[in-house]
Image (spheres, helix red, strand yellow):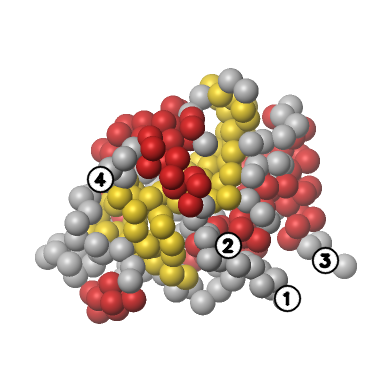
Amino acid sequence: MTRTPQAAAEQAANELRERTGVDGYDIALVMGSGWAPAADLLGDAKHELPSSELSGFLKPAVDGHSGTIRSIGDGDRNILAFLGRTHLYEGHGTDAVVHGVRTAVAAGARTIVLTNAAGGINTDYAVGSPVMLSDHINMTAKSPLSGADFVDLSQTYSPELRAIAHDVVPDLREGVYAAMPGPHFETPAEVRMLRALGADLVGMSTVLEAIAARAAGAQVLGMSLVTNIAAGLKGANLDHQEVLATGRDSAETVGRLLADVVAKL
Ligand code: HPA
């Protein structure tokens, strides 16, 4: 019989505990494009390992996604940071995309922080600025769940965690994140459609992980870094190198903001 995704996550969580010597984690963060340097500000790195050394993890295919798991101690809490993630467009299916989140929850984490790079559809957003997710629109036509797993997504992004983030950063913007399957960027017509549907941000990650985290009973905080204006909203073409460059330029500011928020969660 093939292993269930839950059993695979529990096995990876046991290996993680053994490799890091940490019995249980409190918070896990998935660091998307541009967010990895923020991990340095979260606390002391106690252990670091290539995620592909734990069962069920793949080697990330994308430039800028390093595929490392870091175990961090910030005083009395244990924090897990995934530097890099598996995307749906890599073609390994939804279980591979959410394996990190399931592993983190199996290792005890009840708070999952999902970060990403996104195109700004809301023209009020400045390139290089962080935007907290208030909700999402899943345009991937996929779910990490199967069977009769009717998970309530009314409050996917925890109102409590968002309130804490607002206490720390009162002027933090919020927005609705639309996830497209990628790996291509959107057409201008698609961006106009997403805007009409109520999206403020567009990216290629996060939503399946958020669904898996909610299904596993964890609270989710989502954070985008606006790396570019979405396609067609200004003259220029999009390019992945621009996304990475904005990430590098903004790493320090958004990293400090994220570390300040995580310290209060
Ligand atoms: N579209 C989709 N994904 C992205 C974008 C975008 O404009 N920018 C960064 N990730």
* Residue farthest to the left, as pictured: 235
Say the numbered circle drawn on residue 128.
Answer: 4
In the image, taking residue 195 as reference, residue 56 lies left or right, namely right
Using the numbered discs, state the Cα–Cα distance from disc 2 to disc 1 in whole angstroms: 14 Å
Using the numbered discs, state the Cα–Cα distance from disc 3 to disc 2 in whole angstroms: 23 Å
The residue drawn where x is 34% and y is 58% is: 175
Could you say where residue 180 lies in the image, as x and y percent from the top left? 41, 69
Using the numbered discs, state the Cα–Cα distance from disc 4 to disc 2 in whole angstroms: 27 Å
Disc 4 residue type?
Gly
Q: Earlier in the sequence, mark 3 or mark 4?
A: 3
Q: Which residue is mark 1?
A: 147
Say the numbered circle drawn on residue 211.
Answer: 2
In the image, taking residue 105 as reference, residue 179 lies left or right, namely left
Secondary structure of the residue carrying numbered label 4: loop
Using the numbered discs, state the Cα–Cα distance from disc 1 to disc 3 in whole angstroms: 16 Å
Q: Residues within 10 Å of mark 2 (few under 14, many from 20)?
A: many
Q: Tell me if label 1 and label 3 are in contact, CB under 8 Å.
A: no
